Image: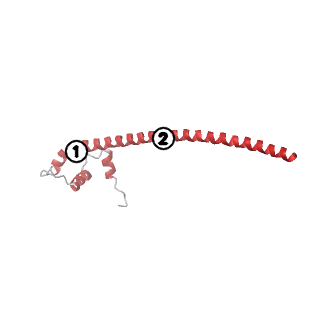
């Protein structure tokens, strides 16, 4: 008799614990779905931010190129009168940018002029 009462108490405890476990499991699943949704929102925002940064950087680079390119022919004309504009040599452009005093105010040219001391 005592054994059956103990057994019944254990069944009751087991049932209560099982119900609690099921409830907690359900809450965890709900929280997980909430976290997944938040992670997706965060990923979308980070992607938009990265696209904006890339676009902004591209606009700055284009601006630097076209602003410099507008000034470049007149400067190059003074440097080399017989320059063939149909064939732009990268080495000559690099030499002129390195020697060109007009372009030093631009931040991308400043970076190019920063030569490490150990180089």
Please give the name of the residue rendered at 77% of the width and 41% of the height, measured from the top-left corner. 12
| Residue 10 numbered tag | none
Query: Which of 98/52 is in front?
Result: 52
Query: Is 108 placed above or below 91 here?
Result: above
Q: Name the residue under label 2.
A: 40
Residue 97 in the image, given as x and y percentages of width and height: 25, 51
Horizontal placement of 99 versus 35: left or right?
left
Dot 1 crowding, Cα within 10 Å, few <14, some 14–19, many 20+: few
Query: Is 13 placed above or below 90 here?
Result: above
- Count of labels in the image: 2
Toward the right, the furthest residue is: 1
Distance from Cα at disc 2 to Cα at disc 1: 43 Å
Query: Which of 64/35 is in front?
Result: 35
Q: Would you identify the image quadrant in which residue 30 lies? A: top right
Q: Would you identify the image quadrant in which residue 115 lies? A: bottom left
Query: Which of 10/118 is in front?
Result: 10
Residue 39 in the image, given as x and y percentages of width and height: 50, 41
Q: Quadrant of the N terminus?
A: top right
Horizontal placement of 14 versus 116: left or right?
right
Toward the bottom, the furthest residue is: 118
Please give the name of the residue rendered at 19% of the width and 52% of the height, measured from the top-left corner. 88
Q: Is mark 2 on a helix, strand or loop?
A: helix
**Mark positioned earlier in the residue sequence (2 or 1):** 2
Dot 2 crowding, Cα within 10 Å, few <14, some 14–19, many 20+: few
Nearest to viewer (mark 2 / mark 1) = 2
Q: Name the residue under label 1.
A: 69
Q: Would you identify the image quadrant in which residue 90 lies? A: bottom left
């Amino acid at each position: 008799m005592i054994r059956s009462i103990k057994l019944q108490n254990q069944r009751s405890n087991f049932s209560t614990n099982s119900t609690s476990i099921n409830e907690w499991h359900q809450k965890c699943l709900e929280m997980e779905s909430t976290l997944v949704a938040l992670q997706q929102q965060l990923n979308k925002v980070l992607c938009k931010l990265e696209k904006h940064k890339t676009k902004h950087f591209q606009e700055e680079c284009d601006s630097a190129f076209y602003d410099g390119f507008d000034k470049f022919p007149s400067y190059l004309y003074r440097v080399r009168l017989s320059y063939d504009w149909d064939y732009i040599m990268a080495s000559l452009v690099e030499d002129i940018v390195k020697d060109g005093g007009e372009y030093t105010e631009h931040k991308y040219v400043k970076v190019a002029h920063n030569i490490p001391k150990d180089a």
